[in-house]
Image (spheres, rainbow, N blue to C red):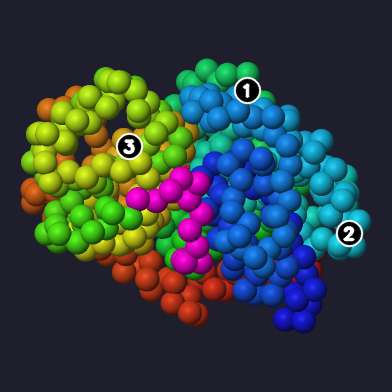
């Protein structure tokens, strides 16, 4: 088996978003440690740093994308463009790799790069989908469109999960999806049908009921391999430079006193919300570390004046960075809460450190993750509106009130479960062995 894997070659096709790049490189690192040789195919926009991974071969394909498209709110439109622009270059690239390597054991592609599946079918190669979202996302976007209301809650025992499913089901059926949304959804579902396996960066104990429900409808083998960031912890895949000065600042703060604020790499926040966020943080009187990305209009006259006023008002109590070493921040003893957009990576990073969350989801699976956090796992509070008074009150509820203590206790319980799950002979390690066997045998 080990010998067979040494000669096995996996091609990993990544998409251009930070959270997806992290998960793909972490997966590649683990597969490499299990004896697979790795070729990474990536887009030109936001390409990773090959020097961080001298053991992998990197190949870039043209994508015809611009930086400004990345900050666009139309994610389905962007995903559609990525697949349209990249299909032909990806086909040529895979043909070239096949000629020079003679053999590809499997092509693992990010679920947003679904154009890969018809190409690998054409080349007679096995395709494996990598989901960087939860199993719940898989259920919502791939299984629910085929179900009616009764089917969607059948087989679920937990009332919270039933409520979440119904809420999501109604939201989905009342939604008027854009043309791009429909196209992307259909292509996604088609790719999954011919995919030889699905990899999900999650932990089974978080999503047991959802997983068994998916298995009723999707015959494709599913490998739950998370939390990937804990299994390949040393790599820094940040596309922006991490500002490590915030760690020295955190070192000076009291235990569990700091609220860390970050809305991931894509979410766009309008001017009014940025202003309310700044004054909500100031009025809360709680120490805070805020990731204010350059793409949030940073550098413009009004943001500079807002940041100056905020710094004057809060002094040493606040620290603002363009990009933080997030995993280190969440693991720091001074951090007691995470105000987040609820991207899936941020969610599992927070769970693994036992940090309770303040949820401000923006779009897509972030909304599902926020429901999971607040209603199912009960390790966070939802920010009902983005007005400064409400921000101030909700921060206090999470960080100082008794209510926050109970939430923190549950977050710490989940952290313990995650640590147990990660132990050497735990489920993740079995799942990886299963995945390695699957890739070597297809
Ligand atoms: N991240 C980081 N520093 C920051 C903000 C985010 O390292 O200042 C990382 C974070 O740890 C996570 C990823 O960027 O791994 C964001 O992924 P997520 O799925 O949470 O959100 P997305 O950016 O895809 O919306």
Q: Which residue is mark 2?
A: 100
Vertical arrangement, residue 115 with respect to residue 197, above or below: above
Give the tally of numbered discs.
Answer: 3
Of callouts 2 and 3, the N-terminal one:
2
Which-is-in-front pick, marks 1 and 3?
Answer: 3
Is residue 389 visible from the viewing direction of this image?
A: yes
Evaluate if marks 1 and 2 touch, with contact meaning CB atoms under 8 Å apart. Answer: no
State whether the magenta stretch is mostly helix, strand or loop.
loop
Question: Quick one: quadrant of the C terminus?
Answer: bottom right
Q: Which residues are magenta?
A: 232-243
Of residues 302 and 355, which is closer to you in this image? 302
Which element carries disc 2, helix, strand or loop? helix
Relative to the observer, which residue lies in front, 233 or 167? 233
Q: Is mark 2 within 8 Å of ligand 1?
A: no
Q: Which residue is mark 3?
A: 292
Q: State the residue position of label 1.
A: 180
Identity of the residue drawn at 57% across and 74% down: 430
248, 289: nearer the viewer: 248
Q: Quadrant of the N terminus?
A: bottom right
Residue 429: which numbered mark, if any? Answer: none
Secondary structure of the residue carrying numbered label 1:
helix
């Amino acid at each position: 088996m080990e010998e067979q894997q040494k000669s096995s070659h996996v091609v990993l096709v990544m998409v251009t978003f930070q959270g997806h790049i992290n998960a793909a490189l972490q997966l590649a690192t683990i597969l490499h440690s299990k004896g697979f040789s790795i070729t990474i195919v990536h887009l030109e926009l936001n390409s990773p740093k090959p020097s961080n991974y001298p053991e992998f071969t990197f190949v870039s394909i043209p994508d015809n994308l611009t930086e400004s498209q990345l900050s666009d709110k139309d994610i389905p439109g962007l995903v559609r463009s990525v697949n349209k622009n990249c299909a032909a270059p990806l086909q040529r690239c895979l043909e070239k790799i096949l000629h020079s390597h003679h053999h590809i054991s499997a092509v693992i592609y990010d679920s947003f790069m679904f154009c890969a599946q018809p190409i690998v079918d054409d080349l007679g190669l096995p395709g494996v989908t990598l989901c960087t979202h939860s199993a719940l996302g898989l259920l919502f976007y791939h299984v629910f469109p085929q179900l009616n209301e009764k089917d969607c809650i059948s087989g679920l025992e937990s009332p919270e999960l039933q409520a979440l499913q119904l809420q999501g089901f109604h939201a989905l059926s009342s939604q008027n999806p854009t043309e791009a949304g429909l196209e992307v959804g259909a292509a996604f579902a088609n790719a999954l049908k011919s995919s030889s396996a699905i990899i999900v960066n999650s932990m089974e104990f978080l999503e047991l009921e959802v997983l068994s429900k998916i298995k009723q409808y999707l015959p494709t083998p599913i490998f739950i391999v998370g939390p990937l960031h804990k299994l390949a912890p040393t790599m820094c895949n940040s596309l922006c430079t991490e500002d490590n000065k915030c760690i020295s600042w955190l070192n000076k703060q009291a235990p569990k006193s700091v609220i860390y604020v970050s809305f991931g790499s894509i979410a766009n926040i309008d001017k009014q919300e940025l202003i309310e966020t700044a004054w909500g943080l100031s009025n809360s009187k709680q120490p805070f570390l805020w990731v204010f990305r350059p793409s949030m209009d940073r550098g413009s006259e009004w943001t500079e004046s807002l940041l100056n006023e905020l710094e004057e008002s809060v002094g040493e109590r606040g620290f603002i960075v363009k990009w933080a070493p997030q995993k280190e921040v969440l693991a720091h003893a001074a951090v007691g809460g995470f105000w987040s957009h609820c991207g899936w990576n941020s969610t599992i990073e927070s769970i693994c450190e036992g940090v309770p969350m303040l949820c401000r989801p923006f779009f897509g699976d972030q909304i599902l993750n926020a429901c999971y956090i607040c209603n199912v796992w009960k390790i966070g509070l939802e920010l009902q509106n983005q007005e400064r008074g409400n921000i101030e009150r909700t921060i206090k509820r999470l960080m100082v009130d008794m209510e926050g203590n109970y939430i923190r206790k549950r977050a710490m319980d989940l952290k313990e479960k995650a640590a147990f799950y990660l132990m050497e002979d735990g489920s993740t390690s079995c799942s990886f062995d299963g995945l390695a066997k699957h890739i070597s045998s297809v």
